[in-house]
Amino acid sequence: MTTIDDFNFKDKKVLVRVDFNVPLDDNFEVTDDTRIRGALPTLKKILTDGGALILMSHLGRPKGKPSDEFSLKHIVAKLHKALAVDVQFAEDCIGEAAQTKANSLKNGEVLLLENLRFHSEEENGDVAFAEKLAELGDVYVNDAFGTAHRAHASTSVIAQFFEGKKYFGYLMAEELKNAGKVLSKPERPFTAIMGGAKVSDKIQLIDTLLDKVDNLIIGGGMAYTFVKAKGGEIGESLVELDKLDLANELVEKAKQKGVKLYIPTDSQIADRFANDAEVYDGPNDQIPADKMGLDIGKVSGEKFAEIIRASKTILWNGPMGVFEMDTFAKGTKTVAEAIVDATEQGAFSLIGGGDSAAAITKFGFSDKVSYVSTGGGALLEYMEGKVLPGVKAIEG
């Protein structure tokens, strides 16, 4: 793997694709700087070498048009504080103004370009747009694992203009290394925990994991599709009625492959989707018609925790319930605590990006697991065995 350790960036203008797609509050303050902190080792290495940094990223989904809501100017102060270096800002990512600022950049200085997705050409993978971006730097570094599964102009197309001068950043390399630990030769027992809303979002991953894991735990909204498929009454709980046959097929496939598949037997049952809802713990397959399950129940939580604590390799992707509401966060926290315990006992634990990363951060466990991925969709696709365009562009 060609990483930035293979190059000295002294006197070079380094164009770095970072993933600064961070959450902002109503005052445009960064509420979670995990992705900014994740990029710091790469950025500091380049600055320490004596290079100049030109940073490009997307933020949100502005749909190809400039928008103050999605402007990267809002993160300049946070980035300045994190790097302890003044951060200049270009009000566009291409064009004369951006080119002038890039040209005048001195060693040790930092320039942040405006949101790439203010141009529809970015997501369309436009070659001419990629070439304009490429003109800003001497060397290209991709450290944005969270977008590595997208064939966008700044993540894959641009690399063709830097033949022999393109590298993975430390974050990208770490993501691939840690995903590889789970995929190649995991220490056993290997337990995967799949949560989230829909079976359809995780079909390919579950199918792939059935060839690799010893235990597969299903939680979150997707669990009710499995319960319904077995004839259970799930009330108003989330369900994919067109995926009932698929759920039964996955159960049968797990049996054939000798994988122990665990589906919750009880739920936190609520009268409505609200933090102050009336809640009780009850059987997963006997939920009244006017109620819904919004978290796994105590019995399931304890069973899942027992399996997790006995594991040596753990992959977690997706919460057990609506953890954003404290009333329905117990199941997700129980799983998180078990993963922490297993990690302390020597297990390797990989936390998928997205909601799993948000949950582990919410509970304050980020530094108590082996690795927290910054890329939800990218990690899923990599685990499914797909080639990531952002990775292929560097590796060739």
Image (cartoon, grey):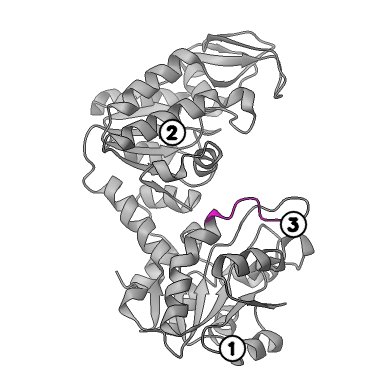
Instruction: Provide the secondary structure element on which disc 1 rests.
Output: loop
Figure check: 342 above or below 97: above
Q: Is residue 177 visible?
A: yes
Residue at mark 3 to residue at mark 2: CA–CA distance: 32 Å
Judge whether residue 29 is colored magenta: yes
Instruction: Provide the secondary structure element on which disc 3 rests.
Output: loop
Q: Amino acid at mark 1?
A: Leu
360 on left or right of 257: right
Taking the spot 23% from the left edge, 42% from the top edge, the residue there is 186
211 on left or right of 274: left
Taking the spot 44% from the left edge, 70% from the top edge, the residue there is 42
Q: In the image, which is nearer the foreground, mark 3 or mark 2?
A: 3
In the image, residue 106 lies at what x, y percent?
Answer: 56, 90
Mark 2 or 1 closer to N-term?
Answer: 1
Q: Which residue is mark 2?
A: 194
Residue at mark 2 to residue at mark 1: CA–CA distance: 46 Å
Q: Which quadrant is the C terminus positioned in?
A: bottom left
Q: Which quadrant is the N terminus positioned in?
A: bottom left
Q: Which residue is mark 3?
A: 28
In the image, residue 178 lies at what x, y percent?
Answer: 33, 52
In the image, residue 387 lies at what x, y percent?
Answer: 38, 59
334 on left or right of 394: right
Q: Which residues are magenta?
A: 28-34
Q: Amino acid at mark 2?
A: Met
Mark identifier at residue 105: 1
Mark 1 or 3 closer to N-term?
Answer: 3
Question: Mark 3 packing: few (<14 Cα in 10 Å), some, or many (20+)?
Answer: some
